[in-house]
Amino acid sequence: MALREINLMVEPGETVALVGPSGAGKTTLLNLIPRFSDPLSGRLLLDGTDTKALSLRSLRSQMGLVPQDPFFFHDTIYNNLLLANPSATQEDMEAACQAAQIHDTIAALPQGYQTTVGERGYRLSGGERQRLAIARVLLQSPRIVLLDEATSALDTVVERKIQDALAVLLQGRTAIVIAHRLSTVLSADKIVVLEKGRIAAIGPHQTLVETNPLYRQLYETQFETHMVEQMEQSESAL
Ligand SMILES: Nc1ncnc2c1ncn2[C@@H]1O[C@H](COP(=O)(O)OP(=O)(O)OP(=O)(O)O)[C@@H](O)[C@H]1O
Ligand SMILES: [Mg+2]
């Protein structure tokens, strides 16, 4: 059993951060939402409707996914973005990439949006891949966003870019985010602490720091951040 006794309500427009140690069940829980797998018992409702009563196509068209290590086809950036929204124009793509903080990087490539990426193509860095995946979801413009944040440590400039890209992505949408970065955790409306497949606690940051030892330990040792930023942000969170 990877998950047990999960009872979670997500309100429209809310950002929910899932945190917990490796193996706690975060990805398993996120994967239930687009029905990549189904629970052995229990139900998952979307606006009160059992998701099993919806077609997979209708269910999944309502959500955009930013995986931990996004996949791109061995094709141009342009064509990869077009898959997210076949009616997108070059202007739409550039606007989405601007918002996702990846346009300047693409524009600086010799072939720009016509650069081939994916296996054997131009090697985008981890941070670039995640930002391009964010642009892809912005083009799709779903009302629900599922995000599995990358764990790799990023330098301050890239960190800030991702933070800005995420702010645009999550604005006005319902989001469930597996959070590894402190800035994401702090910007969530509520934080769900998973431990060994169960929900150990749900709450805002400060309450969890004070009442949940596992959360406090994650806060002190696991969340990716920079010392200065961490201090700034915990001050503003207080
Ligand atoms: N398909 C599967 N079959 C059996 N066990 C699985 C399967 N997928 C995951 N598990 C197990 O379920 C538990 C939860 O895994 P999950 O991938 O959800 O953890 P996680 O919280 O996302 O961890 P991480 O932070 O390392 O990504 C782990 O013990 C894992 O080994
Ligand atoms: Mg995982």
Image (spheres, rainbow, N blue to C red):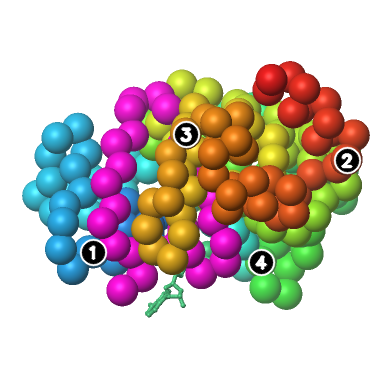
Classify residue 196 by image quadrant. Answer: bottom left
Q: CA distance from mark 2 to mark 4?
A: 34 Å
Whether residue 156 sits left or right of residue 205 in the image: it is: right
Residue 88 visible at all: no
Whether residue 130 sits left or right of residue 17 in the image: it is: right
In reply to whether residue 13 is colored magenta, the answer given is yes
Q: Residue 195: give x, y in percent of width and height.
A: 46, 59
Camera-side mark, 3 or 4? 3
Contact check, label 2 and label 4, Cβ < 8 Å:
no
**In the rendered structure, which disc, 1 or 4, sits on the residue that comes first in sequence?**
1
Q: Quadrant of the C terminus?
A: top right
Q: Is mark 4 within 8 Å of ligand 2?
A: no
Q: Is mark 3 within 8 Å of ligand 1?
A: no
Q: CA distance from mark 3 to mark 4?
A: 39 Å
Q: Which residue is mark 4?
A: 118
Q: Which residue is mark 3?
A: 203
